[in-house]
Image (spheres, rainbow, N blue to C red):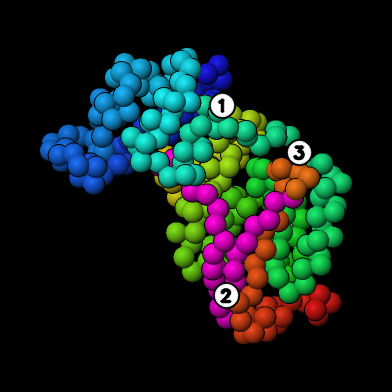
């Protein structure tokens, strides 16, 4: 692996997953007075069929090139989930990563037409680095500050970890923020060494202690549609959370919150300015 950033990320991810494994659940004896939790390097090496030296080099971010077979064996030994396995392979260069660079403007314009058509369902568009590039009136009603945020702050991960308004919206902020971060990391893995991601992560590490703690854990989770709740001045709103990918632009996604009850529809309507109803 020639890219030092990719080697560093791979090393940190392997260490995080190794030290967070439950020894007992793997049929191994408890660690006793060991200072660190999880598995030892030699145990991971034995379980995956590689030499301790080779595995140690990977965790030290040495300039070595692990094969897909070795990475698959490590994924099995570390009991990685599907999302974590995909992330491991993509960081090592064995899976296609997102295209680096800004989303073309015409795509954003077309997506904005779709957002505006989703009347009554808060919806917004995000790019590969989770920059919010468009939103509809219902989303502005749910999260009014989106329209006045400085451009550099109009990023989903940034507002989740730094905006008190968003934190007040989420009754389960601690759980939701960590899940968002795990999803972001799963998607951004191959491009974490790119300037836009480096700047975002550096800013968040500087401004948010919860982000620093969660980032160091290297959790990975793929996106799944799910129920979401928001606390507003009109009461609690219940939605189904979905995300759609633009077929013609790999790095542009539409996030949609679909109301699950008439009460949510009515409360969201009361939040909306009259001109947007």
Residue at screen point 68% across, 84% down: 266
Kindly check if marks 3 and 1 are in contact, taking CB atoms under 8 A apart as contact. no
Image location of residue 177, percent across then percent down: 50, 55
Q: How far separated are the C-alphas under marks 3 and 2?
A: 33 Å
Nearer the N terminus, badge 1 or badge 2? 1
* Residue 132 visible from this viewpoint: no
Q: Which residue is at 63% across, 30% downward?
A: 194
Q: Residues within 10 Å of mark 2 (few under 14, many from 20)?
A: many
Distance CA(mark 3)–CA(mark 1): 21 Å
The mark that comes first in sequence, 3 or 2, is: 3
Q: Is residue 19 left or right of residue 152?
A: left
- Per the rendered image, the range of residues in magenta is 217-246
Residue nearer the viewer, 248 or 124: 248
For disc 2, the marked residue is 238
**Residue carrying label 1:** 93
Quick one: SS at disc 1?
A: loop
Relative depth, front residue between 83 and 252 = 83
Determine the residue located farthest toward the left in the rendered image. 32
Whether residue 159 appears in this view of the structure is: yes
State left or right for residue 194 relative to residue 11: right
Residue 270, picture quadrant? bottom right
């Amino acid at each position: 692996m020639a890219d030092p950033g990719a080697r560093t990320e791979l090393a940190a991810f392997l260490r995080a997953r190794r030290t967070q494994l439950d020894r007992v659940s793997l049929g191994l004896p408890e660690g006793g007075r060991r200072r660190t939790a999880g598995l030892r390097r030699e145990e991971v090496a034995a379980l995956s069929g590689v030499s301790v030296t080779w595995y140690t080099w990977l965790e030290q971010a040495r300039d070595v090139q692990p094969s897909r077979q070795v990475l698959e064996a490590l994924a099995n030994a570390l009991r990685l989930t599907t999302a974590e396995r995909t992330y491991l392979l993509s960081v090592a260069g064995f899976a296609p990563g997102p295209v680096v660079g800004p989303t073309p403007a015409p795509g954003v314009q077309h997506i904005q037409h779709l957002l505006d058509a989703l009347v009554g369902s808060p919806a917004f568009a995000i790019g590969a680095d989770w920059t919010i590039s468009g939103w509809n009136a219902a989303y502005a009603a749910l999260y009014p500050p989106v329209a006045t945020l400085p451009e550099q702050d109009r990023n989903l991960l940034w507002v989740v970890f730094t905006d008190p308004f968003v934190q007040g919206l989420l009754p389960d902020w601690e759980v939701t923020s960590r899940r968002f971060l795990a999803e972001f990391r799963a998607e951004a893995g191959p491009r974490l060494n790119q300037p836009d991601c480096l700047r975002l992560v550096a800013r968040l590490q500087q401004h948010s202690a919860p982000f620093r703690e969660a980032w160091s854990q290297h959790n990975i989770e793929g996106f799944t549609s799910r129920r979401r709740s928001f606390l507003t001045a009109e009461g609690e709103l219940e939605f189904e959370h979905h995300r759609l990918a633009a077929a013609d632009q790999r790095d542009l996604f539409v996030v949609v919150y679909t109301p699950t009850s008439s009460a949510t529809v009515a409360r969201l309507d009361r939040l909306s300015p009259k001109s947007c109803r």
